[in-house]
Amino acid sequence: MLKHFFQQRPTLLPEPIPDVSGLLVERYRSQVTQKHIQHDPAQIQALHWLQKLLEELLVKGAGSQKPCQSLYIYGDVGRGKSMLMALFYDACPITQKRRVHFNTFMQEVHAFIYKWRQQNQTDAISALAQNIRTSVRLLCFDEFHVTDIADAMILGRLFGKLFELGLVVVITSNRHPHDLYQGGLQREQFLFFIGILEKAAHIIELSADQDYRLSYTSTQQVTYYCPTSAEPSERIESMRHFVWQTYRELSGGALLEPDFISVLGREIKLKAVYKDILFSSFDELCAQPLSAADYLAIAERFKIVMMVAIPQLSAEKRNEAKRFMTLIDVLYEHSIKLICSAQVPAQELYREGDGAFEFQRTVSRLIEMQSDSYCQRADTLRK
Ligand SMILES: Nc1ncnc2c1ncn2[C@@H]1O[C@H](COP(=O)(O)OP(=O)(O)OP(=O)(O)O)[C@@H](O)[C@H]1O
Ligand SMILES: [Mg+2]
């Protein structure tokens, strides 16, 4: 669990500074030429900031008095924030770097703090900051969002320490820092984090003019099925039928058996498993109080997640909606194939209530996860 933080990277002898000038735009343009992506002026603009940081990171070196300005990139879903971050990260030649998804990072943070407090009297957050800083100088933090009070309370102090220690971060988020953790409990305390962030980072908006995920097409296989019948009992039956039918095609009709996975000393029972396929229902995974750690364990154990009957969620179902969001984030991040049936199209699953704004990311992802290119990637990983 803590291996990334503890891992000591070798200390390098001084080396000539590699020439990275113009590197990011050059790589971007080459992807455009190869028709992997479309040219987008707003992305180029954001790339200039990343380029500037890349050059500064190399020139200033680790021991510099004045640390580089970090970068916080926000914007609507599917605009290419994660893609640009990946481009930057891959091009960055420093060894003390790490890219991590928000959910995984917070998971590790909580595990570290828990363990530290069992064994020590001293401040866990300072120890954690030191620990992170020992192995990492650049932290790329994808899909930053704060909905949890436990996270909100830790972030301010943790990042305060990390910035003091000269850590540089690149963050992507769907929200401007001022809009983070809106309406959250004890938000006043969270304002401290926003202040720290604004001091340490340039805040830039990526306003590319389309959600690129929506341009993905699916021709090969249906992986998100919505019933067409108007009759409620037929709708339920056809949602079940679709997932079963697809399961039979995939497994040759092999018997599904109960299984369990262990997460931090707890056991999570799963009703129906066959090899790397988890056959589940919405209620099984999202109506119970499962957490990001549990979903991570599922994503690590299975390559295909099948889910019967995702309902349309009303405002009162905010907890189910939040869990479903976390689940989809984790599955998407791990390129897990999702085969599911739902009462309504993804755009209509959860439209009002707490977290409906964040849920747009889930919608955008559910659409991409149906695309041929996503499914092919998932299939390749499965082999
Ligand atoms: N200029 C582009 N041309 C074609 N496809 C693109 C372009 N930019 C991004 N994409 C693709 O669109 C999809 C969404 O991009 P990405 O995941 O980077 O968006 P994001 O801004 O991080 O979204 P989110 O806010 O949901 O995290 C990815 O598959 C990415 O490869
Ligand atoms: Mg992203």
Image (cartoon, rainbow, N blue to C red):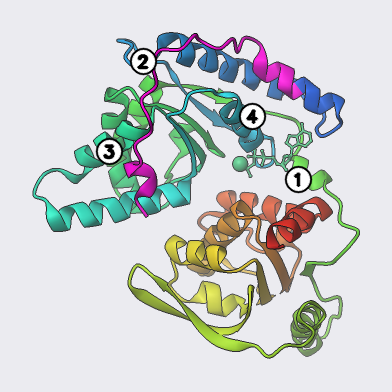
State the SS at label 4: helix
Q: Considering only order in the chain, which callout, 1 or 4, is on the residue closer to the N terminus? A: 4
Q: What is the quadrant of residue 49 in the picture?
A: top right
Q: Amino acid at mark 2?
A: Pro
Q: Tell me if I can see residue 184 in this picture.
A: no
Question: How many C-alpha atoms fall within 10 Å of the one at disc 1: few (<14), some, or many (≥20)?
Answer: some
100 is within the stretch colored magenta = no
Where's residue 274, x and y in %? 64, 81
Distance CA(mark 2)–CA(mark 1) = 36 Å
Is the residue 367 above or below the residue 272 in the image? above
Q: Which mark is residue 213?
A: 1
Distance CA(mark 4)–CA(mark 2) = 22 Å
Residue named by callout 4: 87
Q: Amino acid at mark 4?
A: Leu
Residue named by callout 3: 131
> Marks 2 and 1: CB-CB under 8 Å?
no
Is the residue 6 above or below the residue 37 in the image? below
User: Which corner quadrant holds the N terminus?
Assistant: bottom left
Q: Residue at x 76, y 84 (%)?
A: 244
Where's residue 137, x and y in %? 39, 27
Q: Considering only order in the chain, which callout, 4 or 3, is on the residue closer to the N terminus? A: 4
Q: Is residue 68 left or right of residue 232?
A: left
Whether the residue carrying mark 1 lies under 8 Å from ligand 1 is answered with: yes
The part of the chain drawn in magenta is 1-28
Q: Which mark is residue 67?
A: 2
Q: Considering only order in the chain, which callout, 1 or 2, is on the residue closer to the N terminus? A: 2
